[in-house]
Image: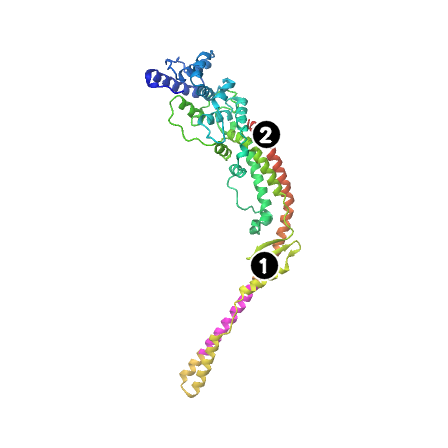
Amino acid sequence: MSTDLTASPPAATELHRYAEALIAHLAAKGTAPPAAPSFSDIPGYWLPPAVEALVALLAGEDPMEPLSRAAGRDQQQTALFLCLALAVSGQGSRIHASWLGTAFGELSVDRPVTHGQRSLWLAAARGAYGPAGKIFVLRKLDALAVQDHADAEQWIQALVPGEPSVVVPPSLADFPEMAEIPELAKPAMAAARLARLRARCAEITSARQGDQTAGAPLDNSAGEPVTNWAEDEPLAVLRSLIGQGGPAGPMASLHTYLLDDLRPGADPHLAAIALHVAAPILRGAAEELEADSRLEPPETLTVPLLGHRIRLRPEGPDQTSLAAAEESIRTEGMTPPGRPWAAIVLIVLGVACLVGAVVAELLLAAAAVAMIGLAGWRLWQRRKKIEADARYVDKQVSELRELAEGAVWALHAYAREAEARAKQGAEDATELTRLIRRGPRAAH
């Protein structure tokens, strides 16, 4: 419910001044300012009686009269104000059970999450309201069946971003191009992804509040104010409620918040809740990845070697495909020499000059000798090129045979790895399922 504060500006000024001092005092010391509030009530405005109710509650007095007046003017804003104020003061356990439901309102996968909902979500995740607060948020999220509206690949990418495009197992270290063959790549990629998911889930579920911040412990058993929330949603929303903050920033969807909470570096308590929501998706993904990690390599496989496709069998490279590759190497490596027309022409001209020299001058004889010598040099160069091509072809053929034999042994080593990979995949899937079954309470 809105009200016109310009109708009583002095009262509004005193109210906001005291509300600002109250919030600052709560965040710093967890108590109300020592001076009693001096503001007057503003008809129709929920904040004055809500502040009175909060002060009475902190002082151990009966807050029912001002609380009733505030709720009558705006029940949701009043509940949100009290829940957040008690959270930032470290006294969230003093909220009434019904206040969270009233303050939180309805959550939907089709509408953005409000700043108030996100602030309560964060406070509950950090233990401001004890186990009951976490359970409340979990039930709100469970009721939406978020996994039914989600793309499993998005959740996995959020948990383990930056995955390599190719995983080269140790057996294929000398033949990395073979690791890109689908029949060999699928089991290795599945096993590697499963291991990364297990490690990330272990990181989330083993997080301890004391390892992350110096603020209040997760269950807030000490009842200390959480001053480290100064830049977070709860205190920012609280300041906005009392008119101290500026306009709220853009709101995000439920999926956006959950995916952000799963990414590495996110708040560990929010990550624990998001992991609980993603658990059904991850269980299905773990089953598929575990099944893929158990895939056995085929007995025969065609692999690219030196630009040629060679079929490999357990007993060695297929001779037909190997012979075809060798023939291709010889065809491409040996340039057809053709007839040495230039040398033939030079020889003919040289002979003609010699014949002419008998009846003519000595200069013509010298030209004839030069032409015949040049022709001989060209023939020698032609022979050297033929020999060089032959050596290159022999080297390529030899290297191809060595690579083919080595690739066969690499496939045998890959097959031996398959058993260990399948065993490790089963262990990772089992542990991953156990970790996500523990849920967010494992972060205590």
Label 2 or label 1, whichever comes before in sequence order: 1
Indicate the secondary structure of the residue bearing disc 2. helix
User: Range of the magenta residues?
Assistant: 371-393
> From what the image shows, is residue 190 above or below residue 306?
above
At label 2, the amino acid type is Arg
Q: Quadrant of the C terminus?
A: top right
User: Extreme bottom residue here?
Assistant: 359
Of residues 4 and 192, the one drawn nearer to the viewer in this rendering: 4
Q: Would residue 36 appear left or right of 428 to someone viewing this image?
A: left
- Alpha-carbon span between mark 2 and mark 1: 54 Å
Residue at 61%, 40% (x, y): give it.
Answer: 290
Q: Of tags 2 and 1, which is closer to the observer? A: 2
Place residue 354 in its image quadrant: bottom left
Where in the figure is residue 121, as x and y percent of width and height?
A: 49, 26
Where in the figure is residue 119, as x and y percent of width and height?
A: 46, 26
- Indicate yes or no whether the magenta region holds residue 42: no
| Residue 26 in view (yes/no) | yes
Residue tagged by mark 2? 438
Where in the figure is residue 205, as x and y percent of width and height?
A: 56, 31
Q: Is the magenta stretch mostly helix, strand or loop?
A: helix
Residue at 63%, 60% (x, y): give it.
Answer: 320
- Indicate yes or no whether the magenta region holds residue 381: yes
Place residue 40 in its image quadrant: top left
> From what the image shows, is residue 179 above or below residue 306?
above
Numbered label tally: 2
Q: How crowded is mark 2: few (under 14 residues within 10 Å), some or many (20 or more)?
A: few
Where in the figure is residue 318, as x and y percent of width and height?
A: 63, 58
Q: Would residue 31 appear left or right of 297 to someone viewing this image?
A: left
At label 1, the amino acid type is Leu
Residue tagged by mark 1? 400
